[in-house]
Image: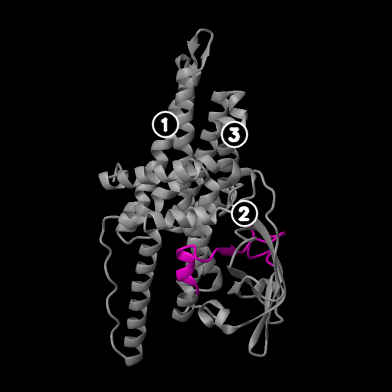
Amino acid sequence: MFQWSEEQEMVRGAVRQFIDKEIRPRIDEFEHGDTPPYEVLRKLLREFGMDVMARDRFAKQIEFEKEVAAATERGEAPPEKPKKDGDGGASSLQLIPIIELCKVCPGMVTAMGVSMGLTSAAINSKGTIAQKERWVGDLLTLDKIGAWAITEPNSGSDAFGSMKSTARRDGDEYVLNGSKTFITNGPYADTIVFICKFDEGNDPAERKILSFVLDSGMPGLEQSKPLRKMGMHSSPTGELFLDDVRVGIDRLIGETENPPSGGREGAKATFMQERSGVAAMALGMIEECLAISVEYAKNRVQFGHPIGDFQLIQDKLARMEVARLNVENLVFRTIEMSAAGRSMTLAEASAMKLYSARAATEVALEAVQILGGNGYMAEFRVEQLARDAKVLQIYAGTDEIQITHIAKDLLRR
């Protein structure tokens, strides 16, 4: 795949029309008015039938899993998994709205992705069929807002080693304690995946990692107000506090204290999904910054010439275009891999995330530079995109963590 198909271009155009009508006129409200983005995102899903498609795909998945479980119980060979259609349509339909939204309001993508992506995936990949039916469908359609809670005040890149949140068994229940911070959708989440260590009286370094599903309003669970931050203002971020929250085993993902691949591996798999999605976010930001910069370079006159006539400005624009092409190709690769039924390795996802995040940040800052004083003003929008882009180098694993994952994988070969 080297370019968008005619059908995909039609989808892009329709999404752009929706954004121009429903989001651009309200950008200041979402950026500065503390207006949660969920209603307009639900409207986006309904407008393009993405909610219906998500529920249909999920229903087929559950039906297949039940057939497999029934066959296994009877001692029969399980049915073969249905093959994908191979056109990458489902993947592109997910990525196109991400790209277009990130041109205008990247925070919305973060809010949407954590709910529909990370939170639902954490349950869908390791949960029981009953748990999936209970929570996943509503998350995939934004009927319920999800939060994936792993980061703590003293555990950033060392998420597991420094983790202090715990679960301890008390009869038939678990008692959860701890706090989480920088949690996307935390203030408004209906469904929360809470990741913690299983306290069996053993050394904290040796404790298992378990994940529980919580609902807002549970006794002992407190969700903070939205935190103030540098960028991504349309993505509510908050803190969670758990004080003796009691849950049954039905809320332990997988309903086992010994998951087949370990709790750490499940969380890492969720990180991989998040990292591969950063390329689509970066592409939207880069395309918008480049378009604004090109238009400005054509019309801004200094020393009697449009600034686009000057080689230093041309150099900046050329480098932006190189970044755009590279990140677009990474997105196309993601679509092709999805169509082929292939998943990225952790190193591949990390490499994609590292390059895309750096490219988006550099392009956004160069856009500010091209626009000069105007670029520093909110009116010209690259100021917002520069603030928003920076977090791509921080969340889902910092640049430094991506480098270690890539290098370790190379050295193991």
Name the residue rendered at 60%, 44% in the picture: 29
Among numbered discs 1 and 2, the one appearing first in the sequence: 2
User: Label 2: few (<14), some or many (≥20) within 10 Å?
Assistant: many
Amino acid found under the numbered disc labelled 3: Glu
Q: Give the range drawn in magenta.
A: 135-163
Percent from the top left, x then y, of residue 333?
A: 35, 49
Marks 2 and 3, Cα distance to the nearest angstrom? 20 Å
The C terminus sits in image quarter? bottom left
Question: In the rendered structure, are the residues bearing label 1 and label 2 in contact, judged by CB atoms less than 8 Å apart?
Answer: no
Identify the residue at the far right of this view: 243
Name the residue rendered at 61%, 75% in the picture: 208
Q: What residue did someone put label 3 on?
A: 383
Note whether residue 410 is visible: no
- Comparing 205 with 213, the one in front is 213
Q: Is mark 3 on a helix, strand or loop?
A: helix
Percent from the top left, x then y, of residue 308?
A: 46, 18
Q: Residue 60 carries which label?
A: none
56 is within the stretch colored magenta:
no
Q: What residue did someone put label 2 on?
A: 236
Residue 362, quarter of the rendered image: top right
152 is within the stretch colored magenta:
yes
Question: In the rendered structure, are the residues bearing label 2 and label 3 in contact, judged by CB atoms less than 8 Å apart?
Answer: no
Query: Which mark lies nearer to you, 1 or 2?
Result: 2
